[in-house]
Amino acid sequence: MAQAYLGNTSLGNLYLGSTQINNTPSYYNTPNITILNAVTSFDESPLIPTKADLESKLTGENITYFVNTLNSDVYATSISNATVTASAFENSFITFFSSPIITELNVYSFAFCPSMSVIDLPNLVTINGSQTFINNDALTNVNFPKLEIMGTGTFQGSEGLISASFALLESFGPSCFSGCTSLNWLYVPSLSGSNAIGGSSDANGCFLDVANSGSITVPSFYQTNNAGNLDGDLAYLVTKGWAITWV
């Protein structure tokens, strides 16, 4: 009975409890099953993660996993912060991810997810490593209100990204928005230190090939942080027709 539901195109909800066949989930490539979560929810079709899959994608203390026998949803609850592991959803068909307990992401956590259009992480603080959201073309708007640190190439190549808001962001690495050809609005009013934009005051390719014209909000410090001149990456935006709002 292994892969008994392989390729099923109409099955909506399926409850298998803890049942596995030869230690292998039997419902690969079955669309329209939503894995919901009291605190963390996501929908990953056609490859639907099992309870064991979810356990491998999230780490943290006091996380409890269980299956709702009424609607077959997989739940994860936690009384503490949680982390999405490196490459957890890389190359997956996840369409959305929402969680108030996630505070940390890692390298490739959501890399190459062509269908993900919604990412809701209101308490995210740190994005470690590089290219966490690389090449996510369906992602159009991002708002991480508590994010403080962002690594290298975080949204690189995400051509559908239009706007991004990070109210508490203190720094981000080089190439973070490189190749985001639709990006035309960025809000980063809390950047701090000479090297906060791309790791230095020079041009670091942070905004290479973004939209021709846009708006960015940054601290006024970056008007002169490059040996008395405009920060190198911001100077590049000016050549692209962007307006800078100083705060």
Image (cartoon, rainbow, N blue to C red):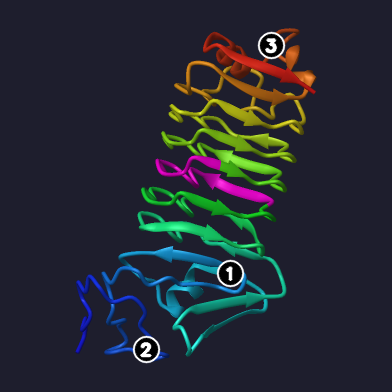
Q: Which residues are magenta?
A: 125-141
Q: Which residue is tagged 3?
A: 230
Q: Are marks 3 and 2 in contact (CB under 8 Å)?
A: no
Q: Which residue is tagged 2?
A: 16
Instruction: Count residues near mark 2 (Cα–Cα under 10 Å), then give few for <14, some for 14-19, many for 20+.
Output: few
Instruction: Count residues near mark 3 (Cα–Cα under 10 Å), then give few for <14, some for 14-19, many for 20+.
Output: some
Instruction: Residue 190: give its label.
Output: none
Q: Quadrant of residue 120?
A: bottom right
Instruction: Residue 59: give its label.
Output: 1
Question: Disc 1 residue type?
Answer: Thr
2 displayed left or right of 211: left
Residue 105 drawn at (x, y percent):
58, 54
Label 3 SS: loop
130 displayed left or right of 10: right
Alpha-carbon span between mark 2 and mark 1: 24 Å
* Residue 107 can be seen, yes or no: no
Q: Quadrant of residue 46?
A: bottom left
Alpha-carbon span between mark 3 and mark 1: 41 Å
What residue sits 45% from the left and 79% below the top? 51
Foreground pick, 68 / 229? 68
Residue 192 drawn at (x, y percent):
77, 31
Q: Nearer the viewer, mark 2 or mark 1?
A: 2
Position of 148 relative to 214 (above/below): below
User: Which secondary structure is most common in the magenta stretch?
Assistant: loop
What residue sits 77% from the left and 33% below the top? 190
Q: Earlier in the sequence, mark 2 or mark 1?
A: 2
Alpha-carbon span between mark 3 and mark 2: 60 Å
Q: Are marks 3 and 1 in contact (CB under 8 Å)?
A: no
